[in-house]
Image (spheres, grey):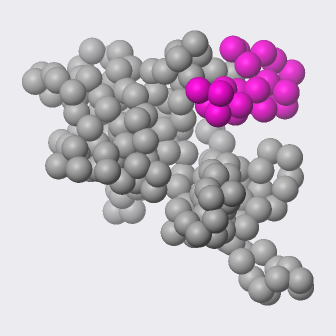
């Protein structure tokens, strides 16, 4: 029996849309409310790998799907490699041992080069959580699950995270 996946979230820092210095993604464990006597009494936060409690903009909250795209270590950005470095430091391993590809989050825009149909081709979709079935789905596909969309009929991961709905809304035009 495999271990359950760690449930992680990411969100933009509060005021990300009005101050460029705060336009960063915060990853960690979601805390629906925190109490702070120096600030507003209740706010939402992410607790990061270092135990920092970071206030977030709730409208940007996204859950990690538990799946990764097919990006190779040598093609990863410095930002993407940073999370492998943090995990390696935490687990006493090397960053390369921690690398599985880019994490796929709710709200990501993903290009896949084989869909769960025999028709193939490139498909660009936005990943969303569907409450009724308690699953992540690519919007506008006939796939039973996100894993079916990513691995298709070949079983090979051909997915690439190309952006997300917050940082790259212009990419959503190509999902229609």
Quadrant of the image for the N terminus?
A: top right
Q: From the image, give the main secondary structure of the stretch colored magenta.
A: helix
Q: Residue at x 79, y 86 (%)?
A: 41
Query: Is residue 71 a member of the stretch shown in magenta?
Result: no
Q: How many marks?
A: 0
Q: Which residues are magenta?
A: 77-97
Residue 46 placed where, x, y %?
A: 71, 59
Q: Residue furthest left?
A: 119
- Left of 53 or right of it: where is 116? left
- Left of 77 or right of it: where is 118? left
Specify whether residue 161 is in view: yes
Query: Is residue 92 a member of the stretch shown in magenta?
Result: yes
Q: Residue at x 32, y 50 (%)?
A: 170
Residue 77 placed where, x, y %?
A: 59, 26
Residue 45 placed where, x, y %?
A: 71, 66
Residue in the foreground of this view, choosing between 75 and 143: 75
Q: Dividing the picture into quarters, in which one does residue 49 lie?
A: top right
- Left of 143 or right of it: where is 52? right
Q: Residue at x 26, y 38 (%)?
A: 124
Residue 175 drawn above or below residue 156: below
Q: Residue at x 49, y 21 (%)?
A: 71
Residue 64 drawn above or below residue 54: above
- Left of 20 or right of it: where is 170? left
Q: Residue furthest right?
A: 37
């Amino acid at each position: 029996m495999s271990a359950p996946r760690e449930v992680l979230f990411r969100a933009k820092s509060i005021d990300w849309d009005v101050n460029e210095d705060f336009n960063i993604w915060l990853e960690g464990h979601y805390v629906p409310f925190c109490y702070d006597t120096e600030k507003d009494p209740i706010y939402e936060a992410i607790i990061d790998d270092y135990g920092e409690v970071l206030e977030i903009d709730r409208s940007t909250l996204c859950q990690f799907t538990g799946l990764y795209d097919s990006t190779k270590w040598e093609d990863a950005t410095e930002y993407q490699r940073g999370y492998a470095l943090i995990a390696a430091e935490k687990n006493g391993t090397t960053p390369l041992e921690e690398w599985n590809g880019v994490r796929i989050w709710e709200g990501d825009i993903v290009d896949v080069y084989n869909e769960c149909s025999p028709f193939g081709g490139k498909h660009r979709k936005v990943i969303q959580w569907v409450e009724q079935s308690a699953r992540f789905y690519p919007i506008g596909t006939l796939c039973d699950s996100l894993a079916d969309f990513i691995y298709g009929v070949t079983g090979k991961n051909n997915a690439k995270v190309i952006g997300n709905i917050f940082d790259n809304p212009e990419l959503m035009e190509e999902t229609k």
